[in-house]
Amino acid sequence: MSDTDVRAVPTPRTAPGPVTHADVVVVGAGPAGASTARFLADAGHDVVVIDKATFPRDKVCGDALTPRAVRALQRLGLHKEAEGDVEGWHRQRGLRMYGGKTVLDLPWPELPDWPAHSVTATREIFDHTLVRHAVAGGATLWEGTEVTGPVWLTSSQERVAGVTWRQRRTDGATAEGTVRAPIVIVADGSSSRLGIALGLHRDRSRPMGVAIRAYYDHARRDLDMMEGFLEITSQGRLLPAYGWIFPLDDGTVNVGWGQLDSSHHFKGMSYRGVLEEWVASMPAHWGISPETSLDRTRSASLPMSHNRRPMCRGGALLVGDAAGMVNPFNGEGISYAIEAGEMAAEAADLALARRDDGPLAAYPSAVADQWGGYYRLGIAFTAVMGNPTIMKACRDYGMPQPALMRFVFRFMAHLVDRRSADGIDRIINGLSRAVPAA
Ligand SMILES: Cc1cc2nc3c(=O)[nH]c(=O)nc-3n(C[C@H](O)[C@H](O)[C@H](O)COP(=O)(O)OP(=O)(O)OC[C@H]3O[C@@H](n4cnc5c(N)ncnc54)[C@H](O)[C@@H]3O)c2cc1C
């Protein structure tokens, strides 16, 4: 794949026609949809990608791209961005963990399969880059266009044949139409209205996270580590939660915290209140305070552990948050959205070539084979970590042990070589294979 300078590619404002035909229609142009569209365009397919937003647009996120996500960017062909070599992208060498009285620097491990650095970019920049990359590869983008439902092939509603859309024009009039395509990619995010319209509902027994983030100016100009915190409290009570400070290229930081919505602490909690309490307790010389807030405080959910299944229904494939692909160990969703986008594009490519839905039906097992066992372990992990007593024990007894923390760090960041003989890889692979896929 070529390393296109995506900054040179303007976002087109293509006007959809009343009925359009494509090989694949992709609904949602976040990381899942934009990357699926790019992989499909690279395979020579005629792709229409539709988003209700107009780019660049904000999205609630920690803005962190771990080495796993850096590798996903490399596979997409975004090499300069993956190195942090472009304005708006910031590079880090590891994670600094704070818990109890311990502060521990955990450099990203040097591994054959993974880069040894992370990057950050605001979602305004990140998503815009991916969308333009898809367009540069040949995908057609309709932005400011809302998908309103599936088009079915027959009245039995077993096979999709495209989607309907609605667009509010600049003169205030509303246009509506249809894109007919044999394959539909559902990449419309956590609440996935299209997934629901296809009869695919969220599995409420699977963990769901909720997190809040805000941007701050600060006085720590030399930050070259991401920072994680096991010390989030509400009125002095330790919460089963984690916090972060992620440095950005423009000299600001993304500060946030999250926990599971199944935690009984979740009910009636003021996320903003806890964030403000935490920020007020930070060392004064960090310069992160209510006064340096850039006040873009917003919260959203993190759908974890494949909480919308099956990921394939009658010609439609679910990718990213629509399928609940967030890693339950660390809240990371972007890498998995891109990785699944590549798998979905491969399945669609084969299905189109063979004129057969078989490869689409195999997509869920391809995803489960990649990380299903690991996610199943994550379900057990979230059940345990939702208990503040265990969280306190991890903070007090785990944090002071660097060797243990290095293992936990690699496990939680899912940096494992599948064929390696390294001890840590063997443990993680063994555990992931020992449980059925989620
Ligand atoms: C507070 C918070 C912090 C997080 N931090 C991180 C982090 O640091 N690193 C990380 O890797 N992940 C993080 N995540 C998770 C990450 O944000 C998601 O996993 C990721 O955005 C999933 O990408 P997606 O493309 O599946 O969905 P989205 O990014 O949600 O994109 C979906 C797109 O679909 C569009 N859409 C929706 N409905 C329609 C419709 N009807 N018609 C047309 N378009 C539609 C939306 O406009 C949107 O552009 C965080 C999440 C939260 C809430």
Image (cartoon, grey):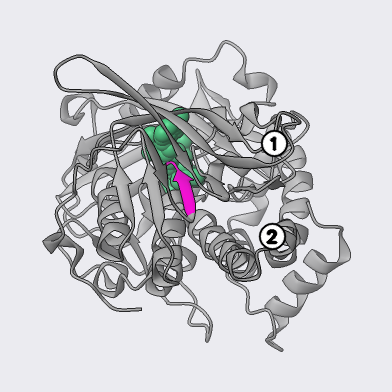
Q: Element under label 1?
A: loop
Q: Hey, which residue is sitting farthest top in the picture? A: 268
Residue 61 shown left or right of residue 5 in the figure: right
The residue under label 1 is 207
Give x and y (percent) for residue 169.
21, 23
User: Type of residue at label 2?
Assistant: Tyr
Give x and y (percent) for residue 306.
69, 45
The residue under label 2 is 363
Compared with 87, 3 (above or below) is: below
The segment highlighted magenta reads: 24-29
Residue 106 visible (yes or no): no
Q: Is residue 26 magenta?
A: yes
**Callout 1: 10 Å neighbours few (<14), some, many (20+)?**
many
- State the image quarter where residue 156 is shown: top right
User: Type of residue at label 1?
Assistant: Pro
Give x and y (percent) for residue 245.
35, 45
- State the image quarter where residue 224 is shown: bottom left
